[in-house]
Image (cartoon, grey):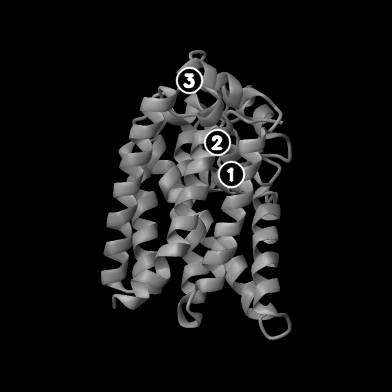
Amino acid sequence: MKRDMPSEGTGDTVGSSPVESGLRAQHPRRDGARASPVGHDLVRPFILAWHFLTAIPISRRHHDVTAEELAASMAWYSTVGLMIGGVLALIDQGLRWWVAPEVVNVLLIVLLALLTRGLHQDGLADTVDGLAGGRMVDDRLRIMRDPSIGALGATGLFLSLLLRYAGLLALPQPWRLPALLCMPAVGRWAMVCVAWGSPSARRDGGLASAFLMNLSWHHVLLCSLVLVVALSAALGAVSSLVTMGLGVALILLVRQGCRAWFGGVTGDLLGATNELIEILFLLFVPVLVMTR
């Protein structure tokens, strides 16, 4: 089933579907509770981000979600991405002594899809179908809402998995752990940056509108600072600056493409952004090593 919210960034908050959680976000709190203390205000968006980005529930107490909280949760996307990367790095370190590198790479790709419910891959396939099958903006958006995946969408998804595998295989061993750790954070940071200031491509607003309308530069700044610190610690200050610079350039291109080809942003486009940036990051790491 298609989701018109940021793929993986729009998951469930209490074990329900992303769409159901998004619908709840359109309504105010039913219990009339007052604003929570600052600590709770920080923890709640993190829990929302964790539930949106992973398939692992950590709380069942957060049922009613406001649009502002959905937007605030995006400030934690790079943090949750680092935690996902930590799981990948840990599994990689545990398996590499027992399993061939090629098999480990496949298992990491499968694990990532399981952890995130494969929503980004779904967004990528839908985006490719929309671009390939529609001449006008409305045609592309209509195709992207079709629950079936076309031949070109399936081909694009296959090629993305192949490129991800090749990128993992080409990683220099000393840089493998830092790359695995930072890869999910880079992709999710890119989603936040593309969403910031972008209009919704859907005339009815779509479920992603809660994120797009309330996302502020404060959220983007926090998400970016976490990523800069992580990249600096993992790759070094110079490599971190180069990576961020290239990332910003790619994000600007993606934003322009979303506006030109789709009239704005949808959840599928954000999911495709994550896949694109993650794969390019993996492919870029060996080049970065050679230029040091």
Marker disc for residue 156: 1
Q: Earlier in the sequence, mark 1 or mark 3?
A: 3
Q: CA distance from mark 2 to mark 3?
A: 13 Å
Q: Residues within 10 Å of mark 3 (few under 14, many from 20)?
A: few
Residue 41 in sight in this render: no
Residue at the spot 66% in from the left edge and 41% down from the top edge: 154
Q: Residues within 10 Å of mark 1 (few under 14, many from 20)?
A: some
Residue at the spot 62% in from the left edge and 24% down from the top edge: 145
Q: Earlier in the sequence, mark 1 or mark 2?
A: 2
Marker disc for residue 128: 2
- Name which quarter of the figure residue 213 lies in: top left
Q: Secondary structure at mark 1?
A: helix
Relative height, residue 268 to residue 172 (above, below): above
Relative height, residue 261 to residue 57 (above, below): above
The amino acid beneath tag 1 is Gly
Q: Which one is nearer the viewer's eye here, 20 or 248?
A: 248
Horizontal and vertical percent for residue 97?
Answer: 68, 86
Q: Earlier in the sequence, mark 2 or mark 3?
A: 2
The amino acid beneath tag 3 is Arg
- Location of the N terminus (image quadrant): top right
